[in-house]
Amino acid sequence: MKKLLILPILCILFVSCERTVYVDRIIEKPVPKIIKDLEVPTGSWQYTNEPNNNYYFAEIDMPEITKNVYDNALIVTYIEVYNSHNTSSLIPLPSVLHKEEKLSGGNWVRYTETIECQYYVGKVRISVTYSDFQPVNPDPGTIHFLMKIML
């Protein structure tokens, strides 16, 4: 008899629960923000050349990242890709791209390129890692980034 009462009680408990409803909110005052165009040109990349952990990186001075910004802001970095029809696309970091390339001997090679961003007070570090951890010739090339800092 007790087992028969458990099922109706559980049904009542689950049906009576309220769902949280989230409401879109309009922010009355503008959010302070900084938008920075960053570019790492070919030849500016450094290579770690360490055993079992090789990657390219570039450090960029960013005086906009103060201790207050570091502690309190939302910082989002994107790769800016220029499309053939005079538009651009933003890819948020970290970005993992699977690529295929034809070698000089006619063979195809598949690999993964991972691009990520680290920031700290006064600097930004962009890293590019290839799945085989081997250097490429030339380096990753010129890559455009867009950083948005919202306080």
Image (tube, rainbow, N blue to C red):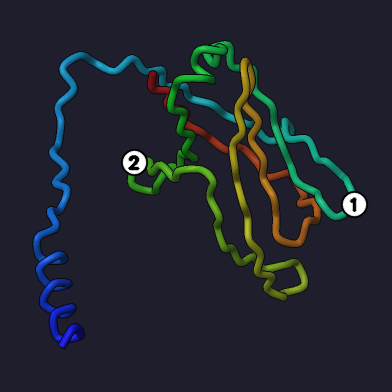
Q: Amino acid at mark 2?
A: Thr
Q: Position of residue 64 (x, y in %)?
A: 52, 13
Which of disc 1 and disc 2 is earlier in sequence? 1
Q: Which quarter of the figure is the N terminus placed in? A: bottom left
Which residue is the extreme one toward the right? 51
Q: Position of residue 40 (x, y in %)?
A: 62, 31
The image quarter containing residue 105 is: bottom right
The correct choice, above or below, for 8 with respect to 59 in the image is below
Name the residue carrying label 1.
51
Q: Which quarter of the figure is the C terminus placed in? A: top left
Q: Can you tell which of label 2 and label 1 is closer to the viewer?
A: 1
The image's mark for residue 87 is 2
Element on which disc 2 rests:
loop
Asked whether, in this view, residue 16 is left or right of residue 74, the answer is left
Task: State the count of labels.
Answer: 2
- Give me the residue at 33% from left, 14% from top: 32
The image's mark for residue 107 is none
Residue 18 vs residue 67, the one in the foreground: 18
Element on which disc 1 rests:
loop
Asked whether, in this view, residue 150 is left or right of residue 127, the answer is left
How far apart are the alpha carbons under marks 2 and 1? 40 Å
Residue 117 vs residue 16, the one in the foreground: 16
- Give me the residue at 16% from left, 43% from top: 22
Q: Position of residue 61 (x, y in %)?
A: 64, 17
- Give me the residue at 67% from left, 45% from top: 128
Q: Position of residue 107 (x, y in %)?
A: 72, 75
What crowding class fits label 2: few (fewer than 14 Cα within 10 Å), some (14-19), or many (20 or more)?
few
Q: Amino acid at mark 1?
A: Pro
Residue 130 vs residue 94, the one in the foreground: 94
The image quarter containing residue 30 is: top left
Residue 133 vs residue 11, the one in the foreground: 11
- Give me the residue at 15% from left, 31% from top: 25
